[in-house]
Image (cartoon, helix red, strand yellow):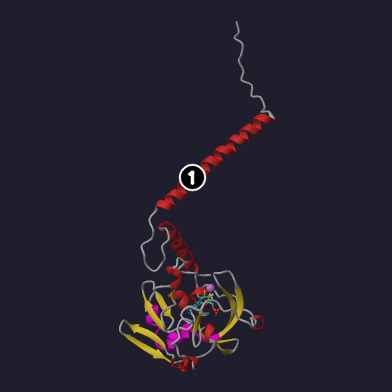
Amino acid sequence: MEKPIKEKVKMPLTVEQKIKRRNFISFTTFLALGGGAFAGWKWLLHSPEEIPGVTGGAKAPLRRALNKTELFFRNFFSNGHLAKTYPKERAAKKVRINSLIGIEDDESFDEKNWKLEVKISPLQSIKIGIEEIKALPKTELIFDFKCVEGWDQIQHWGGVRLSDFLTHFKLDGLAENNYMGLETPNGAYYVGLERDSVLHPQTILAYEMNGQPITAAHGAPLRLIIPVKYGIKNLKRIGLMSFSNSRPHDYWAEQGYDYYSGL
Ligand SMILES: Nc1nc2c(c(=O)[nH]1)N[C@H]1C(S)=C(S)[C@@H](COP(=O)(O)O)O[C@H]1N2
Ligand SMILES: [Mo]
């Protein structure tokens, strides 16, 4: 006698079954992803804050990610890579003025007696007058200035290339340090810059804007123009320059902004 063969026939799914199945898949996916995101958020919430220092109180894993990003871009950074430049006619006639920290809060500042102080050792500095700086070869630059707050503007600046300045005053040895620090004369605004950006050929100590001496609000008598960085690093009214192998203090980094702030 032959046994009846019990065949499992695979019936095609009906439309309703298909919908049910899809609903099930998307709902479990939703739960799984949602659960994962929640776990990740809790992990971040309970992770330690970074050690207080030159940067301002972010969760340690977030800062680590930012530092990795910085490393990635620094490895790609090359002094041969230039920021885009524009013809003079494209430069703004009315140049924007952003914040004035270290400028409007310094009533005792006297431009006529200004000298740039360069710290050449913990106890020694040299002072350089504006005429000595203006005597060096002039570089002009027309580029798109970008502020982290979202605006940008094509601007025309003139001054001495920072690397030329360093060579001329025999500071190139000191500039081999990892960082340069710049501060306003009253020390209220300050930035740190890593060596590659300092030595970039488009980085200038500017004393002219649109072919005229720069105004007080734009940082007279001398400001930094550094196209590889956002506006925050373009310190106006430089009073003090220093060199170090660790990160100098940086006004906006202390507020939690990216220390590197590169473009
Ligand atoms: N001393 C000083 N320099 C400064 C600032 C500041 O507040 N004080 N602000 C920075 C920021 S955020 C920007 S966008 C630029 C703006 O330069 P500007 O005012 O010449 O446009 O200057 C930078 N340099
Ligand atoms: Mo800015």
Who's the residue at 53% across and 74% down the image?
231
Q: Name the spot of residue 215 as percent of width and height, x first.
A: 55, 87
The residue tagged 1 is 36
Secondary structure of the residue carrying numbered label 1: helix
The residue drawn where x is 42% and y is 65% is: 56
In the rendered picture of this protein, how many numbered marks are placed on residues? Answer: 1
Q: Residue at the location (46% across, 62% down)?
A: 66
Who's the residue at 36% across and 74% down the image?
A: 245
Q: Identity of the amino acid at label 1?
A: Gly
Q: Quadrant of residue 24?
A: top right
In x, y percent, where is residue 101?
Answer: 48, 78
Label 1, residues with CA under 10 Å away: few <14, some 14-19, many ≥20: few
Name the spot of residue 110 as percent of width and height, x first: 45, 90
35 or 197, nearer to the observer: 35
The quarter of the rendered structure image containing the N terminus is top right
The extreme left residue here reads: 123
Residue span colored magenta: 158-176
Quarter of the view holding residue 18: top right
**Magenta-colored stretch includes residue 116:** no
Of residues 50 and 69, the one drawn nearer to the viewer in this rendering: 50
Res 261 visible: yes
Instruction: Check residue 160 for magenta coloring.
Output: yes
Residue 153 x %, y %: 61, 76
